[in-house]
Every structure is written in structure tokens, then in C-alpha cells.
Image (cartoon, rainbow, N blue to C red):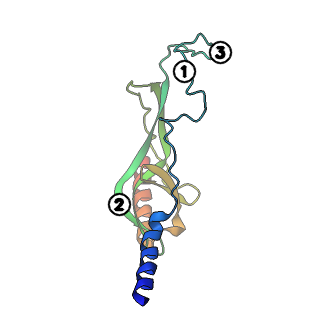
């Protein structure tokens, strides 16, 4: 008797998930959602949406070219806390030219005496973007390097 009850209980536990009701969604490709079936439209249909495309004038657009004046190639800079940064030292002046897109731009001549320090800051090129850095944020070694660069530029300008 006990075995029979155990077998019945085991059968209920095993087959109960099989008896669970499952809801299977219908396939919309077989049975359409609306009772009339799918509506079809003819191609073209003669409907004017009112939109039009204006090609615009056939003008060659101009591009703006910016070149930075590099005073020193890539160098490892560090701040007062010792955090390193690899960057180029660039002047505050930029060479700017406009030319038709795809044409070779004619760049102006660089200034005879480029500006190294402006308002207590230098300019570095980091990841192809100019960044201004305050001199007091630089390590003493880098400040000494800037002083040497400034002396060399002043000597060159005096000639």
C-alpha cells in the first residue's frame, strides 16, 4: 500500500510539468492578425508625398586647415605630482588656411618669434589636440627645460 502511494506521488511529481498548459503564440505569417487578411498596396500608387530633393548648387566646398607650430617633438612631461604625459611643445600661434576640399592648401609662413609662454601657460599637443598647461603645474625639470627653450627663442629672435 505504501509503495502504491509512493508510486502515485512520484508519477504526479514527474508528469505534472508535462500536464502544464503551454501558450504557444500564433505565427503571424500563417494566420493574419486581422480577419480580412493582409492588405496589399500597388507600387507607385500615384500618391504624392509632397517631398522633393533639391540638389543645390554644384559648388566645391572649402575646407579649413589648421597647422600647429611645433617647437619640440614628443617628450615626456610630468606635473608636480610626478604624473607623466607624452606631448609635443607647440606655439600659441596656429597656421590657418582655407582651400577647396581636396586641393592642396597654401599655408602662411610661421612667425619669426613664436609665442612660447602666454599668461603663465605653455601649450602642448596631446593626442592631436592643443592643451594649455600652467607653468606652476609642471615639474621643476620641465620648467627648467621651458626656460632653456625661451632663452633659445629669444636668442634666435635677437639675431
Nearest the viewer among 135 and 97 is 97
Numbered tag placed on residue 75 in the rendering: 2
Look at the numbered discs 1 and 2 and tell me whether their residues touch, using CB distance below 8 Å. no
Nearer mark to the viewer, of 1 and 3: 1
- Residue that sits furthest to the bottom in the current view: 2
- Residue that sits furthest to the front in the current view: 1
Nearest the viewer among 24 and 146 is 24
Secondary structure of residue under mark 2:
strand
Q: Marks 1 and 3, Cα distance to the nearest angstrom?
A: 23 Å
Badge 1 or badge 3: first in the primary sequence: 1
Look at the picture and state if 11 lies above or below 52.
below
User: Is 72 placed left or right of 61 in the picture?
Assistant: left
Q: Is residue 159 visible?
A: no
**Coordinates of residue 96 in the picture (x, y in percent):** 48, 35
Badge 1 or badge 2: first in the primary sequence: 1
Q: Marks 1 and 2, Cα distance to the nearest angstrom?
A: 68 Å
Callout 1 crowding tier (Cα within 10 Å): few <14, some 14–19, many ≥20 = few
Callout 2 crowding tier (Cα within 10 Å): few <14, some 14–19, many ≥20 = few
Q: Residue at x 48, y 53 (%)?
A: 116
Secondary structure of residue under mark 3:
loop
- Residue that sits furthest to the right in the current view: 50
Numbered tag placed on residue 50 in the rendering: 3
Q: Marks 2 and 3, Cα distance to the nearest angstrom?
A: 60 Å
Q: Tell me which corner region of the image, top left, top right, bottom left or bottom right, holds residue 112.
A: top left
Q: Residue at x 49, y 25 (%)?
A: 62
Nearer mark to the viewer, of 2 and 3: 3
Q: Residue at x 48, y 73 (%)?
A: 80
Nearer mark to the viewer, of 1 and 2: 1
**Coordinates of residue 37 in the picture (x, y in percent):** 56, 28
Q: Which residue is mark 1?
A: 40
**Coordinates of residue 57 in the picture (x, y in percent):** 54, 13
Amino acid at each position: 500500500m505504501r509503495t502504491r502511494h509512493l508510486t502515485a506521488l512520484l508519477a504526479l511529481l514527474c508528469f505534472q510539468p508535462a500536464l502544464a498548459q503551454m501558450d504557444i503564440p500564433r505565427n503571424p505569417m500563417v494566420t493574419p492578425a486581422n480577419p480580412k487578411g493582409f492588405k496589399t498596396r500597388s507600387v507607385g500608387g500615384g500618391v504624392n508625398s509632397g517631398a522633393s530633393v533639391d540638389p543645390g548648387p554644384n559648388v566645391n566646398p572649402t575646407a579649413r586647415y589648421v597647422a600647429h607650430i611645433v617647437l619640440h617633438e614628443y617628450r615626456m612631461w610630468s606635473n608636480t605630482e610626478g604624473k607623466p604625459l607624452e606631448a609635443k611643445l607647440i606655439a600659441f600661434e596656429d597656421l590657418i588656411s582655407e582651400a577647396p576640399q581636396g586641393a592642396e592648401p597654401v599655408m602662411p609662413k610661421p612667425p619669426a618669434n613664436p609665442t612660447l609662454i602666454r599668461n603663465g601657460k605653455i601649450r602642448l599637443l596631446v593626442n592631436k589636440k592643443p592643451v594649455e598647461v600652467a607653468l606652476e603645474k609642471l615639474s621643476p625639470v620641465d620648467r627648467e627645460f621651458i626656460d632653456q627653450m625661451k632663452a633659445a627663442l629669444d636668442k634666435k629672435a635677437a639675431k
